[in-house]
């Protein structure tokens, strides 16, 4: 994720979005930030990765949307060994709950001043 531009630059549709909505657990923060940054960097190296947008509030609710070329790219990312290990730690240590939604982006529009 580009901190100076938190809105992902995506190609013209169609493409896919994976929406990860979560609530952090208050019990265990050990290693969370490092793992989250590592997963963002690792995802960016995957074939079919298009970008990411992520926010988290002070109460631990967060949304991360990653963008992908196709469903096969999403499935390959889901099966990356380091990502599988992070998913396991998330379920056992870092998340109270989460949902993953996969969407086909068929149309988009926006506003950029200037």
Image: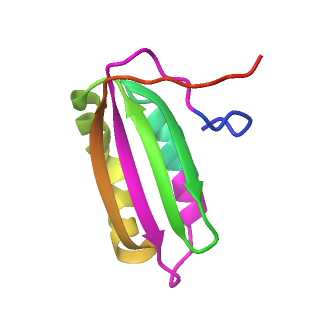
**Relative to 3, is 10 on the left or the right?**
left
Q: Quadrant of residue 41?
A: top right
Measured as percent of width and height from the top left, residue 86 is found at 40, 58
Q: Is residue 82 visible?
A: no
Residue at 42 percent of width and 64 percent of height: 22
Please tell me which residue lies in front, 73 or 88.
73
Residue at 53 percent of width and 82 percent of height: 26
Up-down: is 35 above or below 113? below
Q: Is residue 13 magenta?
A: yes
Q: Is residue 98 visible?
A: yes
Q: Residue furthest right?
A: 114
Q: Quadrant of residue 23?
A: bottom left
Please tell me which residue lies in front, 30 or 112.
112
Instruction: Give the magenta-colored segment's residue range.
Output: 8-36
Measured as percent of width and height from the top left, residue 89 is found at 39, 68
Residue at 77 percent of width and 16 percent of height: 114
Task: Name the quadrant of the N terminus.
Answer: top right
**Relative to 98, is 4 on the left or the right?**
right
Measured as percent of width and height from the top left, residue 72 is found at 22, 29
Residue at 32 percent of width and 65 percent of height: 88
**Relative to 54, is 82 on the left or the right?**
left
Up-down: is 95 above or below 7? below
Up-down: is 103 above or below 111? below
Q: Is residue 19 magenta?
A: yes
């Amino acid at each position: 994720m580009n901190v100076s531009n938190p809105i992902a630059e995506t190609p013209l549709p169609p493409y896919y979005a994976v929406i990860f909505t979560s609530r952090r657990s208050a019990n265990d923060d050990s290693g969370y930030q490092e793992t989250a940054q590592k997963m963002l960097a690792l995802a960016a190296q995957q074939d079919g990765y298009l970008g990411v947008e992520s926010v988290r509030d002070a109460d631990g609710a967060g949304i991360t949307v990653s963008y992908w070329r196709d469903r096969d790219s999403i499935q390959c990312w889901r099966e990356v060994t380091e990502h599988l290990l992070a998913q396991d730690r998330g379920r056992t240590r870092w998340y109270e709950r989460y949902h993953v939604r996969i969407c086909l982006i068929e149309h988009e529009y926006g506003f950029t001043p200037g």
